[in-house]
Image (tube, rainbow, N blue to C red):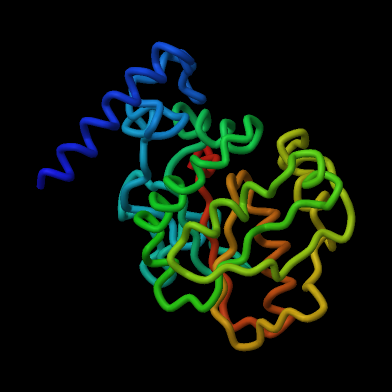
Amino acid sequence: MRSLVASAFRRTIADALLSVLLAPNCAACDRPLDEPTQGPVCQACWQSIRSFTPPLCTVCGDPLPSWRVISTESGTCARCGQQHQVSLSRAIGDYDGSLRAIVHALKYGGRRSVARRLGALLAQHGDAVLAGADLVVPVPLHRSRKRLRGFNQAAEIARHLPVASADVLKRVRATLSQTDLPAAERRANVRDVFARRRHADVNGLVIVLVDDVSTTGATLESCARVLLESGARDVRALTAARVVSRPR
């Protein structure tokens, strides 16, 4: 008990010194950090994330206004009634507000340490997706973009999930950013972009794809198709954030 009190006291002193000497700001809201030893994002931003709550579409993970709009047979929303490669998806919350700012801090600000807490939140909200999974696979970046950024944000999140992760997939060509394209062009943009790495064996495995954001799900579907064609038994998906489809 005494050691815990001493540790807390030392952390308080360290926070005070860092706040005075460095005056760091939150990587999400840009306000001064009260506890810089706890990471680059303030507790207020983490606590203000608006997480998804049931009912959710089984396939895309979108929040639904009522259980009555879910198909009693498939558990999907009306938009997801068609065939999908990804069988089950979940995200922490909507790609908006604090969650969007935190994802940007990781992806564009290089604040890789926030991936640990994003991974913990994903494990909490995506426990059904991770149940029985054999492997977590991050959505890959093209080598030119990874070289420019210095890391793959999806891989950073994936390695903090409670299932072993592996770089099973690769991008065979560079593409435009999905955020730069209208919805109608996103599927074409990622068609035939991914391939299984030569020595990766996924035969019979239940795989969970991981990415930072899902907009239309086109990237995840493209990755899932490759994995299923390579023998995977089931492909699911987790993303830190999801752009909610509106209107429903």
Q: Outermost residue toward the left? A: 1
Q: Residue at x 69, y 54 (%)?
A: 218
Looking at the picture, tell me which residue is in the foreground, 179 or 66: 179
- Give left or right: position of 9 versus 138: left
Confirm whether residue 62 shows in the render: no
Horizontal and vertical percent position of residue 72: 36, 67
Horizontal and vertical percent position of residue 99: 46, 34
In the rendered view, tell whether residue 171 sits above or below residue 116.
below
In the rendered view, tell whether residue 60 sits above or below residue 86.
above
- Report the number of discs: 0
- Give left or right: position of 172 versus 141: right
Looking at the picture, tell me which residue is in the foreground, 16 or 180: 16
Confirm whether residue 41 shows in the render: yes
- Give left or right: position of 92 versus 106: left
Q: Residue at x 31, y 54 (%)?
A: 67
Looking at the picture, tell me which residue is in the foreground, 1 or 36: 1
Q: Residue at x 55, y 67 (%)?
A: 208
Q: Quadrant of residue 219?
A: bottom right
